[in-house]
Each structure stands twice: as C-alpha cells, then as structure tokens.
C-alpha cells in the first residue's frame, strides 16, 4: 500500500508541474533561449521559440510529460515503499527503545537506501525527458525518444547521468524525509498532540512539514540537478567524470558554466520542489489514511521508550 501511495504521490505531482520543470531544465541547459522563468513561459506559449522546435501554446509547456509520469511513478514506488520497509526492518531488528533513540539515523539510512534503488528505475526516463525537453527536435516524447536514444547512443548512455542523479536525489530524499519528520515533531509539539488532532489537522501538519522540507532539499540539491540537465543534453563520448569536467570548465571551444552556472534555474526549482514535496506528502498521507494506515509524521511527545506510539 505504501508503494502504491508513493506511485500516486510522485507520478501525479511531477507530471502536474511539467511546465515549470520544462522551463527550469531549459534555463539550465539553454540559457541563451531561456533568460528567466516568466520569459520562458511567454516564449513557449507565444510561439517565439517555434523555430527551435518548441511547440507553441499551452500544450507546448507539457513536453516530456509521458517520461515524467512513468519515471517518477517508478521512483515513487521504490522511494516510499522501500523507505517504509527499511524503517520496519530497523525497528524490528533494534527494538522500539533503541530505534526511538536513534530515529534520526534510521530516517537517514532508510531514505538513502530507498532513493539509491529508486534512481536506478528513474534514470532512463529522466534521460529521455531531459533530452526531449531541452532538444525538442530530437523526439516528441517517450515512445519515439527512447528507441532513438538507444539506437544512437546505446542503452548504457541512458545511465550517463546516474552519478549526478544520485548526488541530487539522495541528499534531496534524506532531507525530504528527515526534515519532514523533525518539522512534524516540532509542529505537533507546538500545536497539540497528534492523538488529539482530527484527520484534517493531521493532513495540515503533513502538507506544512512537506512544503518546508521541500524548500530546504530543493536548495541543497540544486547544483547536482543542473549537472543532470547538462549531462543528459550533452551528446559526446567519454565517461561521467569527463562530461562533468567539460560542462564545468569547458573544452577549449565551448566555455564551461563555472560555479555560478550551477545555480541557473534556482528560483523556479525551489518553488517547484517546495510545492511538489508538500503535495507529495499530502497525497501519500491521504492515501495511507484511506487504506487505514497512520498518517505520516510522528508525535514524539506521545512516544515512550520501549513502547509503540
């Protein structure tokens, strides 16, 4: 049930914010065409970038929605499903008292392990999504983009961005879960015990904690996100390390982006990730409540050493 909840929360939310993700990726990969968030939206919808292959109108803002839906649905299954599984294993192995005393470390290990596997499932879809969004003449979407990608560059190159993806997503997910749990603890502590809150109040805590956690992890993981966008757009030989050096420092003919370039698209991404994470936790929490499971977020004031809350 938690895996299904993760599928719904990640797949639906990432697909819904495809327009913002499209502008963000292009601000990172094509800064000569996308100078700001508002300009990017206007340029696509007005048809000003039609000569570069960007479809005009509202539909043009949803380019890449299919690989987004598939990729982040797969990611959600592993992210939330394995997180809950790993937490259960730690609690069963250590016992309630020890697990409670080391809950922050358990959150870190469970979320990092879950995201490691989640990114293996996400990476091929992310590669096609970024290529389709930042090079619209390459393909229309997943059905024609995936086989063309494999034919031209080989299956292995779908994982060219796995290193930066792990560098982006694992810290992001650790903060997403650890910050969420800590913020929820503080909110319940300042407001009233979770056991005294009705379901709507609990869901309000879930969304607030998720949004604040999303803002934090969006900021921390942004440089690696920029590198993922650049690597998946770059069509050149060489390993991941070589591509990253070329992107950062240049290759003699093309200048590198440098440190400042790693922060391109920062504002739209932080807004996107904050909203996205808040909605993900809300959908996940609502689904858990619907199937009879506790809503996310613990109230440590109700915890007792050696006793389940």
Image (cartoon, rainbow, N blue to C red):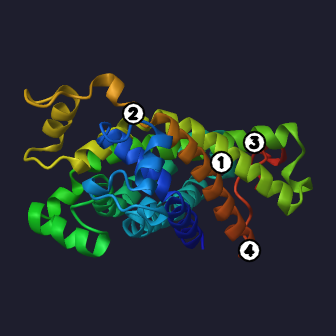
- The foreground one among 255 and 245 is 255
* Mark 2–mark 4 distance (CA, rounded to whole Å): 40 Å
Residues at discs 1 and 2 in contact (Cβ within 8 Å): no
Question: Is 41 positioned to the left or the right of 180 in the image?
Answer: left
State the separation of the CA atoms marked 3 and 2. Answer: 34 Å
Residue corresponding to mark 4:
290
The residue labelled by disc 1 is 210
**Mark 1 or 3 closer to N-term?**
3
Closest to the camera, between mark 4 and mark 1, is: 1
Circle 1 or circle 3, nearest the eye = 1
For disc 3, the marked residue is 185
Tell me, yes or no, if residue 100 can be seen here.
Answer: no
Q: Residues within 10 Å of mark 2 (few under 14, many from 20)?
A: many
* Position of the N terminus by quadrant: bottom right
Q: Secondary structure at mark 3?
A: helix
- Residue 115 or residue 30, whichever sits in front: 30
Q: Which mark is residue 264?
A: 2
Q: Is 169 situated left or right of 233 in this image?
A: right
Q: Residue at x 84, y 39 (%)?
A: 189
Mark 4 and mark 1: span between their CA atoms?
19 Å
Q: Is the C terminus in the top left, top right, bottom left or bottom right quadrant?
A: bottom right
Quick check: marks 3 and 2 in contact, CB under 8 Å? no
How far apart in space, not on screen, are marks 3 and 4 (Cα)? Answer: 22 Å
Alpha carbon separation for disc pair 1 and 2: 24 Å
* In this rendering, the label closer to the viewer, 3 or 2: 2
Say if 18 sits above or below 214 in the image: below
């Amino acid at each position: 049930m938690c895996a299904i909840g993760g599928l719904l929360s990640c797949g639906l939310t990432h697909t819904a914010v495809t327009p913002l993700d499209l502008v963000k990726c292009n601000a990172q990969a094509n800064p000569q065409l996308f100078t700001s968030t508002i300009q990017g939206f206007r340029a696509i919808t007005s048809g000003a970038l039609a000569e570069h292959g960007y479809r005009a109108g509202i539909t043009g803002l949803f380019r890449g929605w299919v690989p987004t839906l598939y990729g982040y649905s797969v990611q959600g299954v592993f992210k939330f499903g394995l997180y809950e599984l790993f937490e259960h294993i730690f609690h069963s192995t250590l016992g309630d008292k020890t697990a409670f005393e080391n809950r922050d470390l358990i959150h870190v290990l469970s979320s990092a392990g879950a995201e490691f596997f989640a990114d293996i499932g996400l990476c091929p879809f992310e590669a096609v999504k970024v290529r389709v969004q930042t090079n619209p003449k390459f393909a229309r979407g997943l059905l024609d983009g995936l086989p063309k990608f494999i034919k031209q560059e080989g299956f292995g190159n779908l994982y060219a961005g796995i290193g930066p993806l792990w560098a982006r997503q694992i810290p992001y997910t650790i903060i997403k879960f650890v910050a969420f749990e800590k913020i929820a603890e503080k909110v319940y502590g300042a407001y009233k015990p979770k056991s005294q809150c009705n379901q709507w109040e609990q869901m309000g805590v879930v969304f607030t904690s998720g949004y604040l956690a999303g803002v934090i992890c969006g900021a921390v993981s942004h440089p690696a996100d920029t590198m993922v966008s650049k690597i998946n757009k770059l069509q050149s030989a060489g390993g991941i390390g070589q591509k990253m050096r070329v992107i950062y420092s240049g290759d003699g003919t093309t200048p590198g982006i440098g440190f400042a370039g790693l922060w391109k698209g920062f504002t739209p991404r932080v807004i996107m990730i904050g909203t996205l994470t808040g909605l993900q936790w809300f959908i996940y929490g609502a689904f858990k409540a619907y199937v009879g499971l506790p809503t996310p977020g613990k109230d440590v004031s109700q915890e007792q050493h050696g006793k389940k809350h």
